[in-house]
Amino acid sequence: MKNKDSYTHVRGESLFVDDINIREGTLHGVVFDASVAHAKIVNVDYSAAEALAGVVKILTYKDIPGQNQIGAIIQDEPLFAEDEVHYQGQPIALILAETLTIAKKAVKLIKIVFDELPVVTTAKEAFDKASFINPARTFKIGNNEDAFDNCKYVFEGETYTNGQEHLYLETQGVYAYPLENGNIKIISSTQGPTSVQKIAASVLGVAMHKIEVEVIRLGGGFGGKEDQATPWATMAALGVAVLNKPVKLILERHDDMRMTGKRHPYESFFKIGLDEDLKIIAFEVDYLQNSGAAADLSPAIAERTLFHGTNSYFVPNAKLTVHSCKTNLPPNTAFRGFGGPQGMFVIEAAIEMAAEKLNIPAYKIQEVNLLQDYDEFPYGQIAKNVEIKNSWNQLKKDIDFENKLKEIKEYNKQHDSTKLGYSFMPITFGISFTNTMMNHARALVHVYQDGSVGISTGAVEMGQSVNTKLLQIAAMKFGINSSKVKIETTNTTRVANTSPTAASATTDLNGKALLMACDAIQDRLESVASRVLKVDKESIFFKDNFIYIKDEKSSLSWDTLIMEAFARRISLSETAHYSTPKIHFDKTKEKGHPFAYHVYGTAFTIVKLDCLRGIYDIESVDIVHDFGKSMNIGIDKGQVEGALVQGIGWMTMEEITYDTKGRLLSNSLSTYKVPDIYSAPKNINVKAMESNGHYMAILKSKAVGEPPLMYGIGTYFALQNAIKAFNPKCKLRFNAPMTPEKVLLSLYE
Ligand code: MTE
Ligand code: LUZ
Ligand code: MOS
């Protein structure tokens, strides 16, 4: 089954927030934001803007009836700045006007006087000044103090990974309008409808039940709308509350790029110790996370960096510490992988460094340290059903590695101005929100009298095709055509208290709740069918829109059965709740069993470097991925390919630059380059490995959204490998992205 939205997407008929027909009297919003990164606000003069014909109201913190506070984990972020600003792009006011053109004109008429303060843009500066979001956290296993003494080899180094702009096709947006009695409906492009509801209620000082949040679908989120759709939605709701009029607010691309947070840049300092068999005996890292000016999701992201600090390797002695450093950048936020990629990059760099010093290829170290069943992760979970060696071995076989390696060496011998480079990249990614409390979901199923079905869950469709998977689940369960099933919009009045669509776990959580709801309805329908057909309940099956008695099709159709059930006053609706069993984590000990299961896989990347110009092609990426028993291999492979290319973009070309005053320089698509079809690998071969799946994965089909992004890390090391083939003397640097400029400098160092 294809993504069920393909048809309307291709025809341009799918609805996004900006496509909603607006109501009469709708006001249009434009945000007035800080032009400097750190300053006291001395004076703001709104008079000229207010005097412009068509400007209806300029909302500031003074108009907030509840709390001027939107911080979800730590309450450290105002909706509108009051007397200080902490990053360029920080919202100060919302102009509401009769037309967008007028609002845009008005924003330019606002006069503001700042008293500028020192600006910190890098994590290291903040670290040195002890400017932190929250206290550092450490995961520990074994005993590092002694372990390093017993290592044959010890190496130290540092790494840097830059941030990443989400560049969802659809920018942040909201349409909100008044209902009766002060109730407000917010249609938001958010991954977290409940977060929007909760924060909007608290800013407006009203009960959550007064706010209804609806999501149709997103034009991509990638984590950028897990938390950061909330401010815009809340501002629009505030406008509705103050003026009793509908408000539309859609960020333009430049504004979105400037005002919203991105993937966190990390600076990390590592020490790795190996024994003579190349086993990693000890590993120590200080991760400096550039959190930006407020917490946002940084503490949770920092935590996931620790969870994935040892990637796919067993490390008996490890000490991993993360520092969330407070800087004057927009608060950085969730981005596919959620701190995991930043953690994995460091151990891959450490292995690369050890390999270079020992004059062996990195894969020899990677290979002997891969996780096995019953190994313990630094956070206490015992690895089970580990597939990493299986994926590694299958990949080596599939690509005929020994021959491949010979070919690469031969090519490099024969070519002076072009060189090939290669790398292996194994991934092990934990599935579940690391905050155990968030791992639950609900579903609401209605079967209508005509046999059609409507399904609501907390899942948000953002291109990952969760709706298609939910549709498959219900259609399969009821044995009916998928055309009989509709996935409804995500709405907080139908399904409440939802976790955001994130952590790759959406189909696992919502899909399992859906299965349970369908089960309950099916149980009642079986009773009705058994009475109508006068057979035992146990012999009733649902298939091809009919009721089967064992293998035999009966004359009773699904539609008729539904009418029968309705006539007998049987409920055709059900709600169900699923919460992931067995997971737990004790933050006081930093130990537990936080993940339902892990996803595994390995990528092999070959790049070809043009050594005159520093540019390169990615020749091929071969992947053996653990989908479990994929419930939709087309969609799942699409997720792997998309995530891979997004990971490659982060590692090679997407370069976010701020000047020393904290102003975003890479603020448009001419200064910020994302992969296009020319920079994508020429060949991507994704193979599903034979695996049993996991019972906690939906229908044993493992979560797939985020893990494959980390295959992209392989491209960095493949490039480094190619550079070394040309210039063996170049110094190893772990400074991503590896842009062609950096490649060129390394080639001739
Ligand atoms: N795929 C598309 N096309 N668009 C997206 O925004 N987001 C990714 C991933 N795949 C995303 C995507 C991220 S960050 C996550 S967490 C998962 O999808 C979320 O959806 P899931 O839980 O249904 O996998
Ligand atoms: N969001 C979150 C996430 O709140 N907790 C997580 O563990 C997580 N993991 C990945 C992506 N988003
Ligand atoms: Mo994804 S970073 O969990 O939205």
Image (cartoon, helix red, strand yellow):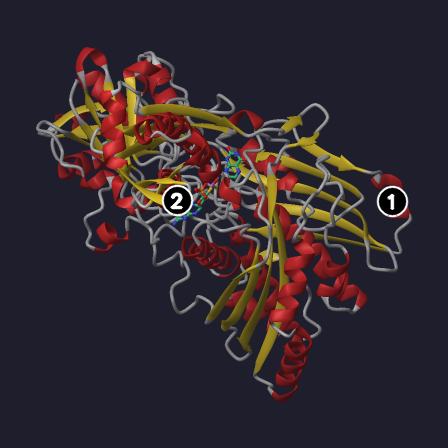
Residue 404 is situated, as x and y percent measured from the top left of the image, at: 63, 77
| The C terminus lies in quadrant | bottom right
589 with respect to 21 (left or right): right
Q: Residue at x 56, y 37 (%)?
A: 696
Q: Earlier in the sequence, mark 1 or mark 2?
A: 1
| 104 up-or-down from 415: above or below | above
Q: Nearer the viewer, residue 598 or 653?
A: 598
Q: Farthest residue toward the bottom?
A: 414
Residue 469's disc number: 2
Residue at mark 1: C-beta within 8 A of ligand 2: no
The residue mark sitting in front, 1 or 2, is 2
| Displayed quadrant of residue 154 | bottom right
Residue flagged by tag 1: what amino acid is it?
Ala
- Mark 1, residue position: 147
Q: Residues within 10 Å of mark 2 (few under 14, many from 20)?
A: many
251 with respect to 677 (left or right): left
Res. 79 visible in picture: no
| Displayed quadrant of residue 382 | top right
Q: Nearer the viewer, residue 233 or 470?
A: 470
Residue at mark 2: C-beta within 8 A of ligand 1: yes
Q: Residue at x 22, y 50 (%)?
A: 8
User: How far separated are the C-alphas under marks 1 and 2?
Assistant: 47 Å
Q: Nearer the viewer, residue 485 or 82?
A: 485
Instruction: State the count of labels.
Output: 2
Residue 331 is situated, as x and y percent measured from the top left of the image, at: 47, 35
- Disc 1 element: helix
| Displayed quadrant of residue 547 | top left
Residue 171 is situated, as x and y percent measured from the top left of the image, at: 31, 43
- Disc 2 element: helix
669 with respect to 614 (left or right): left
Res. 617 visible in picture: yes
Residue flagged by tag 2: what amino acid is it?
Lys
